């Protein structure tokens, strides 16, 4: 269903527009299928979106009883650790809304990576009751090296084409992660790439303009088979993109 690029004058407007899109997509999924399954990203821009979602007027527009939250990746740390993606979401969102504990599905960063990956794959299989989990919404960030979730260039995880999850060692960071894999990410109905700031402008331009997706830049491999890919950008992140490109949408 294609790729859509949305550009906003500043990060604040990008965060507001993304939150609005997320709330609308949650409502549509619940209306059509009775619940919404969403996978969350770590990072500074997602953090601001979660804080906005937890505040008025967005908080009251979400049917939290019918929203199920998952994580796109996690660091191998306990849930209370300052590096935990779960902890970030808990502090910015979960502590401020009435979502049932049973609707929150975290990756267990406190156990061995392979065990955590296996457990999460089983959880996805049981929850979606199908051979192929299909998220309604997936939020993704992008690193300056082209990684997304914890799919880093040169790691085994970018080669995974069957399993839902992967335990991955990232040599550059000397750390283990657990991540969702391309088969799950590309099965989603809506994927939202979030990027803000000048530091992301080069990689954003490179990924968006790339002719042939390459595992050297894992973010370029995200292309939902039966869904839509949205790039949500502020003016600094998209400064190198051709403003005359027909696929770019400027709401200003």
Image (cartoon, rainbow, N blue to C red):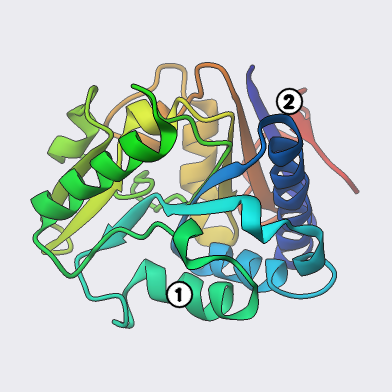
Q: Is residue 8 above or below residue 191?
A: below
Using residue 237 as the reference point, say whether residue 114 is left or right of it.
left
Residue, far right: 252
Residue at 40% of width from left, 57% of height from top? Answer: 105
Task: State which mark lies toward you, 2 or 1.
Answer: 1
Q: Is residue 183 above or below residue 78?
A: above
Number of the label disc, if any, that sits on residue 118: none
Res 17 quadrant in image: bottom right
**Residue 154 locus on image (x, y percent):** 16, 39
Residue at 53% of width from left, 27% of height from top? Answer: 209
**Residue 228 locus on image (x, y percent):** 62, 27
Residue at 69% of width from left, 37% of height from top? Answer: 29
Query: What crowding class fits label 1: few (fewer than 14 Cα within 10 Å), some (14-19), or many (20 or more)?
Result: many
First along the sequence among labels 2 and 1: 1
Residue at 49% of width from left, 70% of height from top? Answer: 89
**Residue 74 locus on image (x, y percent):** 30, 60
> Which residue lies under the disc numbered 2?
247
> Which residue lies under the disc numbered 1?
88
Q: Are marks 2 and 1 in contact (CB under 8 Å)?
A: no
Res 227 quadrant in image: top right
* Front-lying residue, 128 or 182: 128
Q: Is residue 170 visible?
A: no
């Amino acid at each position: 269903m294609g790729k859509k690029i949305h550009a906003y004058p500043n990060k604040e407007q990008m965060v507001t527009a993304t939150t609005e899109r997320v709330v609308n997509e949650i409502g549509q999924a619940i209306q059509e299928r009775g619940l919404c399954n969403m996978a969350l990203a770590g990072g500074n821009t997602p953090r601001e979106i979660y804080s906005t979602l937890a505040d008025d007027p967005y908080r009251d527009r979400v049917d939290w009883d019918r929203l199920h939250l998952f994580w796109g990746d996690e660091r191998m740390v306990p849930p209370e650790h300052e590096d935990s993606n779960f902890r970030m979401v808990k502090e910015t969102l979960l502590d401020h809304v009435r979502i049932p504990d049973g609707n929150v599905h975290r990756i267990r960063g406190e156990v061995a990576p392979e065990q955590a990956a296996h457990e999460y794959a089983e959880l996805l299989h049981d929850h979606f009751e199908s051979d192929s989990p299909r998220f309604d919404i997936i939020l993704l960030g992008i690193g300056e090296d082209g990684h997304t979730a914890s799919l880093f260039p040169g790691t085994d995880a970018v080669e995974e084409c069957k399993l839902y999850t992967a335990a991955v060692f990232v040599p550059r960071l000397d750390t283990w992660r657990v991540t969702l894999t391309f088969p799950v990410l590309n099965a989603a109905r809506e994927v939202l790439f979030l990027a803000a700031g000048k530091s992301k402008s080069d990689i954003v331009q490179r990924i968006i303009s790339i002719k042939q997706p390459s595992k050297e830049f894992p973010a370029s491999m995200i292309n939902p088979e039966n869904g839509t890919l949205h790039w949500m950008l502020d003016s600094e992140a998209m400064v190198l993109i051709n403003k005359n490109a027909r696929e770019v949408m400027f709401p200003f």
